[in-house]
Image: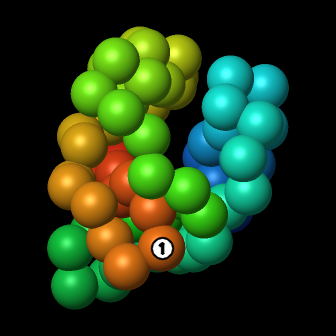
Amino acid sequence: MTDFDTIWRQQDEIRTVVDAAVGCGIWNLSYSERLGAIELELATHLDEDAVSDLCCQFPLACDYDGEGARGSKFVFGV
């Protein structure tokens, strides 16, 4: 059973960190039932240092998932 209330709160935390740390928009922020994780794709591509800095800012475990069509991608365990 997926606790969507927890997922929504975690997505709000992720959105807050992105707004404060990077200032760029979010292209996609969604929960993947297949992965059991929250997926984030930014609206811009970040360099390696910015990716590392951003990953350190999140209160959740975060993995860099490469570059997507629109921007840098991250995955968060739920």
Task: Depth check: give the residue in front, 39 or 7.
Answer: 39
Asked if 57 appears above or below 33 in the picture, the reply is above
Query: What residue is rendered at 37% in x and 79% in y?
Result: 69
Query: What residue is rendered at 43% in x and 40% in y?
Result: 46
Amino acid type at image mark 1:
Arg
x and y, in percent, of residue 9 in the image: 70, 49
Asked if 67 appears above or below 61 in the picture, the reply is below
Q: Quadrant of residue 67?
A: bottom left
- The colour scheme used here is rainbow
Which residue position is annotated with label 1?
70
Q: Quadrant of the N terminus?
A: bottom left
Query: What residue is rendered at 36% in x and 33% in y?
Result: 47
Q: Is residue 7 visible?
A: no
- In the drawing, does residue 78 fall left or right of residue 23? left
Task: Depth check: give the residue in front, 59 or 74.
Answer: 74
x and y, in percent, of residue 77 in the image: 30, 48
Q: Is residue 50 visible?
A: yes
Task: Depth check: give the residue in front, 26 or 16.
Answer: 26
Residue placed furthest toward the bottom: 34
Q: Secondary structure at mark 1?
A: loop
x and y, in percent, of residue 56 in the image: 41, 14
- In the drawing, does residue 21 fall left or right of residue 30? right
- In the drawing, does residue 21 fall left or right of residue 39? right
Task: Depth check: give the residue in front, 39 or 20.
Answer: 20
How many dots with numbers? 1
x and y, in percent, of residue 35 in the image: 21, 73
The crowding category of the residue bearing disc 1, from other C-alpha atoms within 10 Å (few below 14, some 14 to 19, many at least 20), is: some
